Image: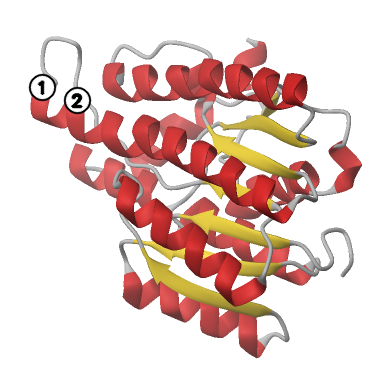
Amino acid sequence: MDRVKNKVAIVTGGASGLGKSSAILLAREGAKIVITDVDDENGTKVVQDINNDGGEAIFIKQDVSKEEEWKMVIETTIKTYGKLHIVANSAGIGIGGTVEDVTLDDWKNLIDVNLHGTFLGTQYGIKGMKETGEGGSIINFSSIEGLIGDPNLPAYNASKGGVTIFTKSAALHCAKQGYKIRVNSIHPAYIWTPMVENFLKAQGNVEEGKKQLESLHPVGHLGEPDDIGYGVVYLASDESKFMTGSELVIDGGYTAQ
């Protein structure tokens, strides 16, 4: 329980899925956790679970696309725990539809959360870490869809591709400034989360859709949230101290094809 002992971590989108797993695993490894999400009910439950397990966590309701809310989250984190070392920008949404079908409103909504939210989380994360003065690690959630194209996910591709290259820019800036702040992206394939399940429900057949998704991965199955959470712990810890501007791909062989 000491891979990130005495570090303070903000995890956005921490009420469910990959964010929830990341928050729980970081807490088990000794970090103090600030969970943020628009879903205050489930976010509060995750905090209770962490605290009941002997960890330390608080919840803040946040829309990651709003700058004022990022200011509040950073201020509350510093006020509560005194420091900031880790930001995991996990919050994200998914919208399907081809380039001919997706609406401009859907496009803007997805870019707002996935790309603008990650930009703000990185920018304000750097501010909080500079105030702390102990360096840190920012982990931006991209996707395999930030590395390859999908004919049915143009908006998602655009947002996650933006996260991938933006991460490299921020990493180089922090390195050249001597901040000792590392910025990396993590790239899951299809993980069995509420977002993926809801996406398949919208398509009309969850079981058939799940089998089709499984067939896309050479390992023959979908990932689990902890598969990504363990990657977050690695990137958050000093074990990855020589990594910045890098892509941690956890995809069951998807992009090796």
Question: Which mark identifies residue 104?
Answer: 1
At horizontal 64% and vertical 40% (from top left) the residue drawn is 138
Q: Are marks 2 and 1 in contact (CB under 8 Å)?
A: yes
Q: Is residue 103 visible?
A: no
Residue 73, visible in the rendered structure: yes
Amino acid type assigned to the residue bearing label 1 in the image? Leu
**Amino acid type of the residue tagged 2 in the rendering:** Trp
Looking at the rendering, in which quadrant would you find the C terminus?
top right
In x, y percent, where is residue 100? 12, 10
Mark 2 — residue?
Answer: 107
**Quarter containing the N terminus:** bottom right
Quarter of the image where one finds residue 4: bottom right
Q: Is residue 17 left or right of residue 181?
A: left
Which residue is more in the foreground, 71 or 231? 71
Along the horizontal axis of the image, is 239 left or right of 129?
A: right
Secondary structure under tag 1 reads helix
Compared to residue 156, the image places residue 40 above or below, namely below
In this picture, is 13 found above or below 149?
A: below
Q: Quadrant of residue 54?
A: bottom right
Mark 1 Cα shell of 10 Å, populated few (<14), some (14-19), many (≥20): few
Question: Residue 228, position in %: x, y?
Answer: 64, 45
Marks 2/1: CA distance? 5 Å
Query: Residue 17 appears at what percent x and percent y?
Result: 48, 56
The answer to whether residue 85 is above or below residue 143 is below
Residue at horizontal 72 percent and vertical 22 percent from the top: 246
In percent of the image, x 24 and y 28: which residue is there? 96
Q: Considering depth in this image, is 41 or 184 the residue closer to the camera?
A: 184
Q: Please state the horizontal and vertical placement of residue 154, each as a whole percent of the image.
A: 29, 16
Left or right of 71? Residue 104 is left
Q: Residues within 10 Å of mark 2 (few under 14, many from 20)?
A: some
